[in-house]
Amino acid sequence: MSDVLIAITVLWGFIFIYSVMATMDFGAGFWSLVYINKEKTNATNIANRYLSPTWEVTNVFIVAIVVALFSFFPGATFTLGTVLLIPGSIILLLLAVRSGFLVFSHIAEEYRKPLTYISGVTGFLIPGLLILVLPVTHGNYIEVRNGVEQLLFGELLTSYHAWSFIGFAISSTLFLSSLLLADFSNHADEEEAYKIYRRDALLLGPATLLMAFLVMFTMRYEAAWMYQGMMEQLPYLLASAFAFLLAGLFLYLPLGKRKLGWPRLAVIVIVLQYLLASYAYGRAHLPYLVYPTVTIEDGFTNPDAFRALFVSYIFGFAILFPGFIYFWKLFMKDKRYAKQQKSGYSK
Amino acid sequence: MDHLETARAMFGTTMAFHIIFATLGVGIPLMVLFAELFYQKTKDRDFAVMANRWTKGFAVLLGVAIPSGTIAGVQLSLLWPGFMEVIGEVMALPFQIEIYAFFVEALFMSIYVYAADRISPWMRIVSLSLVALGAVASAILITNVHAFEGTPAGFRIENGEIVDVNPWEAFFNPAFFTTAGHVVVSAYTTGGFVIASIAAFKMMRQPVGSRLRRFHQKALLLGLIVGGIFSLLTALNGHESAQLLHEYQPEKLAAAEGLFETQDYAPLAIGGFTDRETEEVKWAIEIPWALSFLSGNRFDTVVQGLNDFPEKWWPPLYVHTLFNAMVGIGSLLILIAAGGLGWYKFIKKRPFPKPLMGLFIASGPLAVLAIEFGWIFACTGRQPWVIYRMMTTEDAVTGATQLGVLFPLFGFVYIVLGIAVILVLRFYFKKHPVQDEIDMQE
Ligand code: HDD
Ligand code: HEM
Ligand code: HEM
């Protein structure tokens, strides 16, 4: 693989990991809000127990993406920085409010409800805005004025294409997080919560599929070059659709001694499904970072800097790996944690 | 305000907000670590209570440090795309390595807070050390980018193209160690004095000789010891930073000292305000020869004055006042710590006198102010350059024009978060008074 392909693969890998972790994270925040009044089902507790230790780690990925972007592709920084100023700033503001109030809601028990409302709602808005970066890179909403690229924010917000992406982001967020929380509550033997989240996932899955089709449909008219690229990756798209159905099956069917599906399998297959779909999307997007002005080739950094960065990635993640495993063991595998009644702060 | 000024004000506001939480995020874990270690050594449960309470406070502060840092990081690319283009090509390593530091801190912070009851005491100390290490590493690495702005190395700009890139030479630029060292020791200073401040404040509200007063006094002493040691180191290292300016950014040193004429046996002007018209520092105390000695360890060191440089390269002249305020606070902090510890050691029988308690209470906010002054001095003192003698700030700024709307929005969110964090901290510690925790432990 050439250097530039390695770089874009690492970047896309971060984007993929973040998008899965973040949808689960923001979604969990939203569910903890929705079920806040259902005291006896524990659905809110489950969501919070998942959310409390993970949000910080998830947040680091957003920084990792920005750093990977300007360090591997400094030539794209000017264009992206300029056109993303407005949407980027709005995301940052929502993120700040969301993270802050999420932590506050764990600390100030008596004000938990209003604080959870604020963090839940702001968090819910973020994925819809984050995904707007994708249609922006499709190029239709950028105009050069006085030699400077400007984002046509109004036109972006009134396009069907953008809205199909927003719809997709929101339904994905709710779908992925309910699926994950179903698995998490199953793991914690929380029968009631499991039933609730499984039901939500079964409802939202088809909605998400529908949104994905809508994205393809609007893409055909508003970003024909992307659509063509996607069609060249048809086998991946079909495999992805198949994986989606399989996950639905795992969740739905009363298999073996469990009466209500196999959530763990469903989660794994769904992550695989998103991987396939985003691979197809990423491939179709190449060689453009921003269509039609910035390609990966002309944005790429110099070979020395690339080599130094690459070595640092390998070292960094080799050192971090045990940390991630330990973290996972303590919070995702250890039933004592999943079953705990109270969060760590309140003791 | 024109476009460039708005961008600068906006970024400066973000940084000024972030730095409060970031500095405490470096300083407080060290205090928690000391408390844990003291507890393991002396088995005095009060220290365990302190570690526990400070961690709670720290976790709340992180809730603001992390999102505001995320804003800082992303805003660099959004507001200064021209700058980040160069950084991306030349100085990406510190940002990259910083990500690993963030991961270490985030992973082990969650483990320390949420898995405390399921891991061994030994593992708790390891986790805590890793949190402290992650925090300090991220501070060192980001400061390195700032050091690079002042003493760029490892590349050249030829016809607008970046050539001869050497990422490691850029990483180990001349100011790296001194600057990073200064930021770290000043953050530990701040951590120590902020704890001392709070402890002194609480002590005042308890009757002399009471159990709670003794508890807070232990915290006060720990804060004074740590703060005292690190404020001394800060001053020593700050002196080195100034010598670095003498060598690499002479016009910045000249502005910091209000010196217009190049001279040997240069006097040091303490306090006062630089006056452009008369080319002198008004209402300052002058110490003859001192500036020359401080700059080069010899009285006959020639110190360059502002008149040696074209006026369009001059930093704003008010940096003299900022610089002096920082140094003044630094010196005062050393005295406060020495006074407090001396009193305790030699006149132990009697409680601290009221004025001294007042100084203790003031020390934490003063340290935070010194941090703010130091940064504003370092950043505005570099103007008009964003990368010294390589790129002006004007060339780095974004072309997007909607800053006027965004600036107030960011300001508003910082105010909301700032107020909320104070309310939440007060609420939490009111609901969980020290007495309860001491009772629980006993
Ligand atoms: C508690 C905080 C604190 C205290 C007491 C001091 N400083 Fe400081 N100083 C900082 C916190 C700080 C800082 C916020 O960390 C800065 C801003 C940028 C930087 O690199 O460190 C800084 C910058 C800074 C610079 C500018 C470096 C540059 O522009 O590149 C100099 C010359 C000094 N300091 C010197 C001193 C001296 C001689 C002190 C004597 C006591 C002192 N500082 C106390
Ligand atoms: C954390 C404390 C910091 C504070 C309070 C601070 C403050 C400021 C202020 C007030 C400005 C505006 C300068 C002016 O226009 O006069 C500024 C600009 C800037 N600072 Fe800092 N700064 C901090 C840290 C940093 C660090 C760590 C970096 C490097 C990574 C940095 C990089 C910049 C850049 C790129 C600009 C914009 C261009 C410029 O005006 O020079 N700052 N900062
Ligand atoms: C331009 C300057 C700066 C940038 C771009 C920046 C960036 C960031 C970012 C992105 C985060 C959030 C990390 C996360 O997601 O977990 C953060 C947090 C933090 N930063 Fe800053 N920072 C700057 C200045 C500083 C300085 C000067 C210090 C130290 C004195 C510092 C120390 C910290 C600490 C302790 C945290 C919180 C804990 C953590 O590491 O996650 N930062 N910063």
Image (cartoon, rainbow, N blue to C red):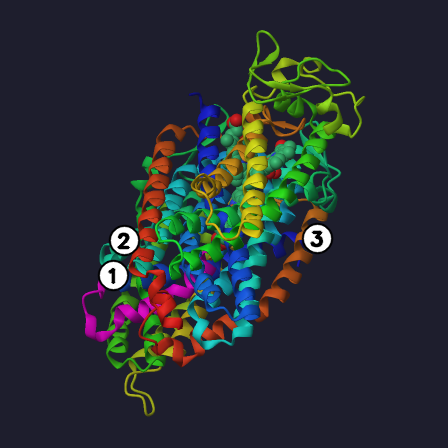
**Residue A258: in sight, yes or no?**
yes
Q: Quadrant of residue A193?
A: bottom left
- Above or below residue B216? Residue A74 is above
Camera-near label (3 vs 1) is 1
Q: Which residue in the structure is indicated by mark 3?
A: A307
Q: Is residue A256 magenta?
A: no
- Mark 2: amino acid: Val
Q: Give the range drawn in magenta.
A: A34-59
Q: Which residue in the structure is indicated by mark 2?
A: A121
Residue drawn at (67%, 40%) of the image = B237
Mark 2 surroundings within 10 Å by alpha-carbon count, few (fewer than 14), some (14 through 19), many (20 or more): some
Residue drawn at (22%, 66%) of the image = A35
Q: In which quarter of the image is residue B437?
A: bottom left
The residue most toward the top is B278
x and y percentages locating residue B74 in the rendered image:
48, 43
> Which chain hosts label 2?
A
Mark 3 surroundings within 10 Å by alpha-carbon count, few (fewer than 14), some (14 through 19), many (20 or more): few
Q: Which residue in the structure is indicated by mark 1?
A: A33
Q: Earlier in the sequence, mark 3 or mark 1?
A: 1
Q: Earlier in the sequence, mark 1 or mark 2?
A: 1
The residue most toward the bottom is A257
Residue drawn at (25%, 73%) of the image = A42
Q: Do the residues labelled 1 and 2 touch (CB within 8 Å)?
A: yes
Residue A23 falls left or right of residue B349: left
Q: Is mark 2 on a helix, strand or loop?
A: helix
> Which chain hosts label 3?
A
